[in-house]
Amino acid sequence: TDGQMPQTREHLLLARQVGVQRIVVFVNKVDTIDDPEMLELVEMEMRELLNEYGFDGDNAPIIMGSALCALEGRQPEIGEQAIMKLLDAVDEYIPTPERDLNKPFLMPVEDIFSISGRGTVVTGRVERGNLKKGEEVEIVGHNTTPLKTTVTGIEMFRKELDQAMAGDNAGILLRGIRRDQLKRGMVMAKPGTVKAHTKILASLYILSKEEGGRHSGFGENYRPQMFIRTADVTVVMKF
C-alpha cells in the first residue's frame, strides 16, 4: 500500500554487491488493494526496479499475496496458495548452493554454552568441509593462541550424529575447553589450515546519501565496525 520503500532499494543494492544472482519477490498486503490495475502497475514497477539493479526483472518470479490472510486462513487464493507459490518459486528459480566438501573443515562460532557434566558446546553453520566425531579441531581468533581440542559429540536438531558437513547448522561438543575461553566470531577449523590476521585488504562500496548511506565523507583512521562471518570488530581504515 505504501509502494516501494527506501530499504527495498538498499536491500537490492546490497544483494547485488554480495553476489546474489537471482531474486524472488513476494508482494505482501494485496488484500488491501481492490484495483487489479494497481497490482499490474506494482508488478511492472518491481520488474523495472530489478532490472535497474542488475537482476533479471523480466523473468524473476513475482508472487502477489497476503501473509495475514495465510495466517488467518481466509482468502486462500492470496493467502495459503500464494505462500505455496512462493515456496515453489524459490525451489524452481533459486539454484541450490553447492556444498563445499572438498576443502578443509571450517565453521564460524556463532554461540557458546555449557552442558553440565558434558562440556562446552559451540554452535554455527559449517562453511566448508566435514567434521567427524573424535577428530581434532583448532579454534582461532580474537588475538588468542589457537586452542586445540577434540570433538566428542555432534548434534543437529536435537539428534546426535557422527558427522557434520558444509551447509549444516550444528552443535559441536568439545573436550577440555571452558566457555570463557571462547567468543562469538572465532572460527573452528582443521588444525593448521587457518590463521588469525590483524590486517586485511578490502575493496569497498560506500552507500551514497541517496542510497540510504552516508551523508558525509570519511578519511584515514576512520573506525567503523566490520562484520565478517559471525565476528563484529572495530577496525581502523588506512588508505
Image (tube, helix red, strand yellow):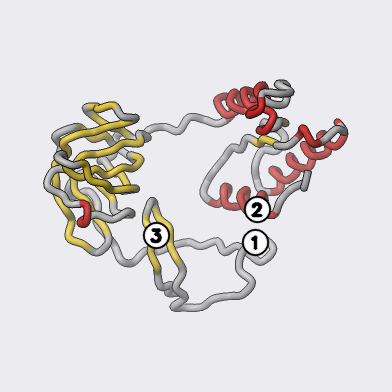
| Quadrant (top left, top right, bottom left, bottom right) of the C terminus | bottom left
For disc 3, the neighbor class at 10 Å (few under 14, some 14 to 19, many from 20) is few
Q: Position of residue 171 (x, y in %)?
A: 28, 38
Is mark 2 in CB contact (under 8 Å) with mark 1?
yes
Mark 3 belongs to which amino acid?
Asp
Q: Which residue is more in the foreground, 92 or 123?
A: 123
Q: Which residue is more in the foreground, 7 or 71?
A: 71
Alpha carbon distance from label 2 to label 1: 8 Å
Which residue is pictured at 63% across the width and 54% down the height? Answer: 10
Mark 1 belongs to which amino acid?
Gly
Alpha carbon distance from label 2 to label 3: 22 Å
Residue annotated with mark 3: 232
Which residue is pictured at 32% across the width and 48% down the height? Answer: 111
Q: Residue furthest left?
A: 176
Please determine whether, in this image, residue 109 is positioned above or below residue 101.
below
Q: Is residue 59 visible?
A: no
Mark 2 belongs to which amino acid?
Gln
Locate residue 137 relative to residue 36 in the image: left or right. Answer: left
Residue annotated with mark 2: 7
Residue annotated with mark 1: 212
| Quadrant (top left, top right, bottom left, bottom right) of the N terminus | top right
For disc 2, the neighbor class at 10 Å (few under 14, some 14 to 19, many from 20) is few
